[in-house]
Amino acid sequence: MRPIGNDFDRRAAGSTTVNHWIQRRFVPRYPDFKVKVLFADGRAANGNTLLETVRSSYV
């Protein structure tokens, strides 16, 4: 059973930008909320940052 709100079987591609992920995956499901994508050190990623860059900061 999937957690509530998890409509995806796969994660977004690493070549996806933060902005694209927000517009395509976050906003349609949570239209009344704002989101910041954070690097492991707590800095906010800007919209043109690739998800693979953000993910690699957590390794």
Image (cartoon, helix red, strand yellow):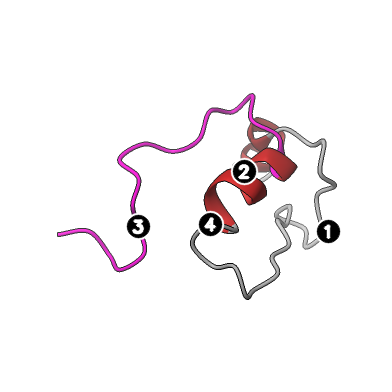
Which residue is the site of mark 1?
Answer: 43
Q: Nearer the viewer, mark 2 or mark 4?
A: 4
Q: Secondary structure at mark 4?
A: loop
Q: CA distance from mark 4 to mark 1?
A: 24 Å
The residue at 44%/38% (across/down) is 11
In the image, which disc is placed on residue 14?
A: none
Q: Nearer the viewer, mark 4 or mark 1?
A: 4
Which residue is the site of mark 2?
Answer: 21
Amino acid type, residue under disc 1 in the picture: Arg
Which residue is the site of mark 4?
Answer: 28
Choose the circle earlier in sequence order: 3 or 1. Answer: 3
Q: Mark 3 packing: few (<14 Cα in 10 Å), some, or many (20+)?
A: few
Q: Which quarter of the rendering shows the C terminus?
A: top right
Amino acid type, residue under disc 2 in the picture: Trp
Amino acid type, residue under disc 3 in the picture: Asn
Q: CA distance from mark 3 to mark 1?
A: 25 Å
Estimate the x, y position of residue 24 in percent, counting from the top left. Answer: 58, 44
Q: Is residue 43 magenta?
A: no
